Image (tube, helix red, strand yellow):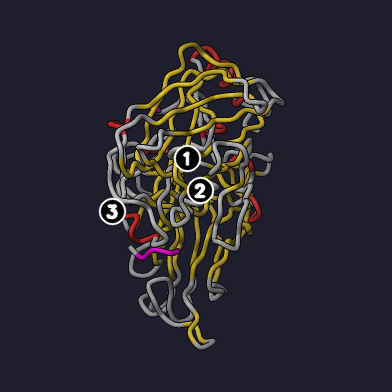
Amino acid sequence: MVLSAIGAWCFPWPATAQNNPGYYGPAVQMDVLDNLPVAEADVDYRFRAASGSIVNSFIWWDKYGKVKNSVQVCDGYGCGTGGSVDICIYLDDGKPDHIWTGKPLGCVTDSNLRSGEQIRTETFPVSFQLDAGRLYHLHWHNTDANPVKNFISVNDICVWHPTKPRQPAIPDSDLAVIVGTKTVETDTPIFQLNYEDGTTQGQGYKESWNYMPEDISGGARTRELILVTGQVRTVKSLSVRVNRVSGNSALRVTLSTASGAVLEQGEIPAAIFPAGNRLTANSLASQYVTPTWGTYTFAIPRILRSNQYYQLILSAPADTVYQEYAIQKASVYGFSPRTFFADGHGEFSRDNGSTWAGFKQTEESRNHTDADIQFYFTLWSEQVGHGNSLKRRGK
């Protein structure tokens, strides 16, 4: 591994909680990027088709290598010519390990990959159709005569300490990364599939800023600012992923309107979040940190009304320090809002909430509105059925 800086449902859903029945929010966990060389072994993304339409194109993230003295050098990301890669869609074999099988349904060949790093859109030259709800594989194979010397990598998102399921709102069967024939338990794909009927599906978070964390302690707090779109959401619980550094006071969660009217305030006990090291500017050191999901259940279901702003605020007493960091959406790279949480963005405050700013990617790149904190709401069960009927249209 080389690093760059629900039970199954009866119908397929795109990869983020925004579009899954029962959830509202990103519901994506990520620590770092992982690049997987397409060299001696093939790289594969397993997914469950969200439409029975014709597949037009897809988006993926290619990484070739670094530049030294104006010359690209071989490293764990890529080497030589970059190779020639066939990217194909296969059927799933239906066996317990769920790997690809048979002849490809459609392929794209790309041999112009020596671009350093690029999120690419590929168009299939020949049309073919998928069956909604069936498992398929998007599969990279290097056809170069010497793939060990001529290769590129595929980027995906990674957590240092894998969980079951890998992502809290997605069944492991429905979204996975495979190298050779082995599932990479730490990794989740970055991709988008585009159908002729306008349906898009995929996982559209591309980067973690855990090297630019913000404290949650005393006057320092974080929030997700949300503008609800579409249907009304009735939420029964909230889950957040944070890192506890020190202290034993609970993490306080506040759900309020944009004007500050509190809908509910409660606590998640500190013991839910294992205490450990502090996140720093060294992204690789984050492997020794254990951000963890904690859940707060509302006293009664809370209604989030369409076209209204809400705040989800995380705070803690000064005797305890938690940390939060943002995950970035690939919104400027052609990814559809259906592949990430499009209804909000994360912010931080260091003055008790008097002023707020978007998370930083670097000290120079500040006040972002294209990144979220790691959270999700679980919907009230009666609304889940209503949501299912809406989503079956696949749009």
Distance from the alpha carbon under mark 3 to that under mark 1: 19 Å
Circle 2: element type = strand
Q: Amino acid at mark 3?
A: Tyr
User: In this picture, is 339 found above or below 66?
Assistant: above
Distance from the alpha carbon under mark 2 to that under mark 3: 19 Å
User: In this picture, is 12 found above or below 85?
Assistant: above
Does the magenta run of residues contain 22?
Answer: no
Circle 1: element type = loop
Cβ–Cβ under 8 Å for marks 2 and 1: yes
Query: Residue 172, located in which quarter of the rendered image?
Result: top left
For the magenta stretch, what is the residue range? 2-7
Q: Nearer the viewer, residue 330 or 113?
A: 330
Q: Nearer the viewer, residue 21 or 139?
A: 21
The answer to whether residue 2 is left or right of residue 90 is left
Which quadrant is home to the C terminus? Answer: top right
User: In this picture, is 313 found above or below 180?
Assistant: above
Q: Which residue is mark 2?
A: 327
Residue located 61% across and 42% down the image: 356
Query: Residue 166, located in which quarter of the rendered image?
Result: top left
Q: Is residue 222 visible to the viewer in this orientation of the structure?
A: yes
Q: Which residue is mark 1?
A: 374
Q: Position of residue 161 (x, y in %)?
A: 30, 47
Q: Which residue is mark 3?
A: 288
Residue located 52% across and 12% down the image: 382
Q: Amino acid at mark 2?
A: Ile
What is the crowding at mark 1: few (fewer than 14 residues within 10 Å), some, or many (at least 20)?
many
Q: Position of residue 194 (x, y in %)?
A: 62, 47
